[in-house]
Image: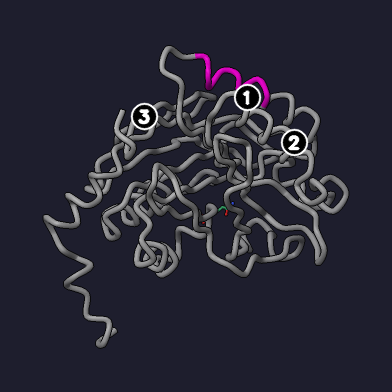
Amino acid sequence: MSERKLRLAIVQMHVDAGNPDVNYARLRQKLNEAVQTAEKPDLIMLPEMWNTGYALEQIDQIADFEGERTKALLSEFARSHQVQIIGGSIAEKREGGVYNTIYAFDANGDVMADYSKIHLFRLMDEEKHLQAGDKLGRLEVAGAEAGMMICYDIRFPELARKLALGGAKALFVPAQWPNPRLHHWRTLLMARAIENQMFVIACNRCGASGTSTFFGHSLVIDPWGEIIAEAGEEEVIVRAEIDLDMVDAVRAKIPVFEDRRPSLY
Ligand SMILES: NC(=O)CCC(=O)C(=O)O
């Protein structure tokens, strides 16, 4: 397989709000399922806040301290299976409060990047319980630049554009995006892919928590805006293969980045 190709395994799973022990056990099982294929994935991706769900009233007590429990599990799994992991996001407690943080691991189990959600979602009370991050999510996959955003972040096209201008060819988006906004989810993800001519790989949770239901529909979208893979509403490992060289081909065909007029806007 060429260096620019990536086999993806996207873990669309249920999350038990307020019950980290159940979620860590479920995740371990899902990771094992993700690598039980004839062709091993190069990269596994997880959904947003999979360790605690949106149990925000108790988040201070149950968030993972400095991500230690998560890093121990994901680093060991990445190393022993020689697979990269975009560790969804977790509720992470550190100095200053609780953050909604992605840790990404290379195939040696080392943390290659981290990103804490920078736009907190008021409709789910995030701003009352979480702290916003203050840096961009950049990493390298298959020898190419890539970016990370979390859920509500996709409503901010400037952020995806900034990552694309910085060289990102793929955007990873873990989410807990509930009903009834499936139309927004699919449309915004497709728009980010088309306008930035990049792959968008989005992992949503499924199942119900309290009065919220989550529709899943994890997606892999190519730089032309075509959907390569899409889940339904149930727990599933979505598998897809992408070739990052397609980004250069699409950008050459319609040279949006050359035609920009930043002096006017
Ligand atoms: N967890 C989130 O950020 C949810 C974002 C969302 O549902 C939206 O409509 O935006």
Q: CA distance from mark 2 to mark 1?
A: 12 Å
Residue at image mark 2: 72
Q: Residue at x 55, y 28 (%)?
A: 82
Q: Amino acid at mark 2?
A: Ala
Circle nearer the N terminus (3, 1): 1
Q: How is the image coloured?
A: one colour
Q: Which residues are magenta?
A: 28-36
Quick one: quadrant of the C terminus? bottom left
Of labels 2 and 1, the one closer to you: 1
Please name the residue that numbered disc 3 is placed on: 240
Report whether 135 appears left or right of 148: right
- Callout 2: SS: helix
Q: Is residue 35 magenta?
A: yes
Q: Relative to 261, is 240 above or below?
A: above
In the image, taking residue 158 as reference, residue 73 lies left or right, namely right
Contact, CB < 8 Å: mark 3 with mark 2? no
Q: How many marks?
A: 3
Give the SS element for disc 3: strand
Q: What amino acid is found at the position of numbered circle 3 in the picture? A: Ala
Sooner in the amino-acid sequence: mark 3 or mark 2:
2
Q: Residue 92 colored magenta?
A: no
Percent x, y of residue 39: 41, 17
Q: Residue 227: give x, y in percent of width and height.
A: 29, 38
Q: Which residue, as the protein is rendered here, is positioned at the far bottom? A: 263
Q: Position of residue 244 (x, y in %)?
A: 30, 43
158 lies left or right of 49:
left
Q: Is residue 10 above or below residue 140?
A: above
Is label 3 in contact with label 1 (beta carbons under 8 Å)? no
Q: Quadrant of ligand 1?
A: bottom right
Q: Is mark 1 within 8 Å of ligand 1?
A: no
User: Tag on residue 80?
Assistant: 1
